[in-house]
Amino acid sequence: MLNSMGWVALPEYFPWLALFIGLCVGSFLNVVIHRLPKMMEREWRAQCAELAGGSASEGERYNLIVPRSRCPSCSHAITALENVPILSWLWLRGRCSACRARIGLRYPLVELGAGVAAAYAASRYGFSWAAGGAMLYCWCLIALAVIDLDTQLLPDDITLFLLWAGLALNLNATIVPLANAVIGAMAGYLFLWTVYWAFRFATGKEGMGYGDFKLLAAIGAWLGWSKLPLVVLLSSVVGAIVGVSLILFRRHGREIPIPFGPYLAAAGLIALFWGDAIAKRWLPILV
């Protein structure tokens, strides 16, 4: 059956379609997580060479598309059958088909997380712009969280895209009214900026990076200013629990920095789907 726009009206199948798309996007997110920091490093090296009056070596073309995905241990080119989300990892038993090097569990977990998040967004919002926006929001936060865990970097290519995408989506109040989103973006950035400088003046040290400001601004652009207190509270609680646990049980030195981005990303996901329920139940002052 076709609706007036010519789309097949099968809402009951939309979450399954979203799950499939999300799994495929998750496979691409693994490429982004692995390559984007390396691309940033190459760009920094080229800029440094240019400032020094030299020229950076061209080397192999390297971006999110080329070269083909390879095993980092033996450079075996990954075939199409070896790149099926989750199933290929299970079939290969988590090892490279050529050199038998271990393939980390993180790869299928990223794919699964992207797929489940997309399916849940589809089932919650139905076939709508809100569902598509929620999927994009979740995928960006997943990529940012894992990149920050690996490198303690939150790339502007993702955080700024996420911020502007949130404002664009809310032009028609898809998730929150535009004014709420604009104030959320400003308040998110200024809050962590203020915390950063207060901590720096008090201790002489940097407590977080500028990428955290931009990430909270992006979350504010999507969810609005009213969700920011919940996001900050959730991220701080989770971060404190994880940080103390690492120090106590894994002998993680207190001087070793712990990235804050993953906790902001997790709090942003929770606030999107369950923020209203949590606020009404536990934090009625925020509602």
Image (cartoon, helix red, strand yellow):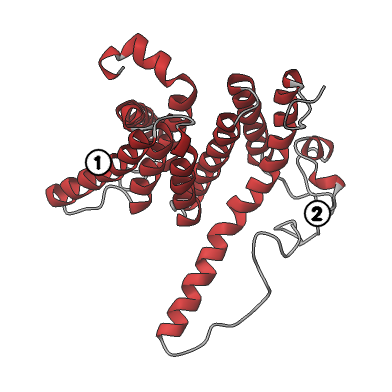
Is tag 2's residue or tag 1's residue first in the polypeptide sequence? 2
**Is residue 128 found left or right of 154 in the rendered image?**
right
State left or right for residue 120 relative to residue 66. Answer: left
Residue 82 spot, x, y in % from top left: 83, 46
Question: Furthest-top residue in view?
Answer: 281
Which residue is nearer to you in this view: 98 or 166? 166
Say which of 192 and 86 sits in front: 192
Q: What is the count of numbered marks?
A: 2
Dot 1: few (<14), some (14–19), or many (≥20) neighbours within 10 Å?
Answer: some
Is 60 situated left or right of 224 in this image? right
Q: What residue type is labelled 1?
A: Phe
> Residue at the location (43% across, 78% down)?
48
Residue 15, position in %: x, y? Answer: 70, 24
Instruction: Identify the residue at image location x=76%, y=31%.
Output: 7
| Residue 23: quadrant of the picture | top right
Q: Residue 102 or 215: which is nearer the viewer?
A: 215
Residue 178 percent location from the top left of the image: 38, 36
Q: Is residue 269 above or below residue 144?
A: above
Extreme-left residue of the structure: 202
Q: Position of residue 218 (x, y in %)?
A: 41, 43
Kindly identify which residue carries mark 2: 78
Is any atom of residue 259 visible in this view? no
Q: Name the residue under label 1.
A: 191
Whether 14 is drawn above or below 255: the answer is above
Kind of residue sitting beneath label 2: Ile
Answer with left or right where residue 72 lies relative to residue 191. Answer: right
State the CA–CA distance, disc 2 to disc 1.
44 Å
